Amino acid sequence: MQTIMAVDDSESIRQMVSFSLKMKNYNVMEAENGREACKKMEQCKADLLITDLDMPEMNGIELIRHMRLLPHYQNTPVIILTTHSDREMKQQAKDAGATAWITKPFRPSQLLLLVEKVL
């Protein structure tokens, strides 16, 4: 069973992402910011990271950059799930190591298709 880390400071978004993924038999870990995600991902290997950009303590870009420094996360796919859609932000995320981008609001089916594509 593949493990996915879902990171968002919105509990309702985390719940929706988690519920959708669990329906497809993924194991899901949740964190409300990048700092919490880092701690959890060091203890338990995630096969995919889904993260928001705007979060307190450590934002999504900082989380990706930190993750890419760890040997076992250098090639792990990363999906950005955010309200941002501007080109500059997308480029920053891509430069940090993001694999794909999905804009909120989103449909669970849309997210699941993207997850299957990058895994």
Image: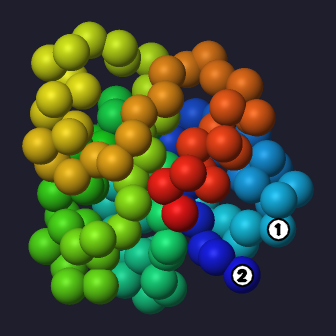
Q: Which residue is mark 1?
A: 25
Image height of 45 relative to 114, above or below: below
Q: Who's the residue at 36% across and 68% down the image?
A: 76
Residue 111 percent coordinates (x, y): 64, 38
Residue 87 shown left or right of residue 33 in the figure: left
Residue 77 percent coordinates (x, y): 39, 60
Q: Which residue is mark 2?
A: 1
Front-most of residues 80 and 77:
77
Q: Are marks 1 and 2 in contact (CB under 8 Å)?
A: yes
Residue 39 shown left or right of residue 63 in the figure: right
**Badge 1 or badge 2: first in the primary sequence:** 2
The quadrant in which residue 36 appears is bottom left
Q: Provide the secondary structure element on which disc 1 rests.
A: loop
Q: Residue furthest top?
A: 86
Amino acid, disc 2:
Met
Q: Who's the residue at 76% across and 35% down the image?
A: 109
Residue 102 shown left or right of residue 66 in the figure: right
Front-most of residues 25 and 61:
25
Badge 2 crowding class, 10 Å Cα cut-off, few under 14, some 14 to 19, many 20 or more, is: few
Residue 78 shown left or right of residue 24 in the figure: left
In space, the residues marked 1 and 2 are separated at their CA atoms by: 7 Å
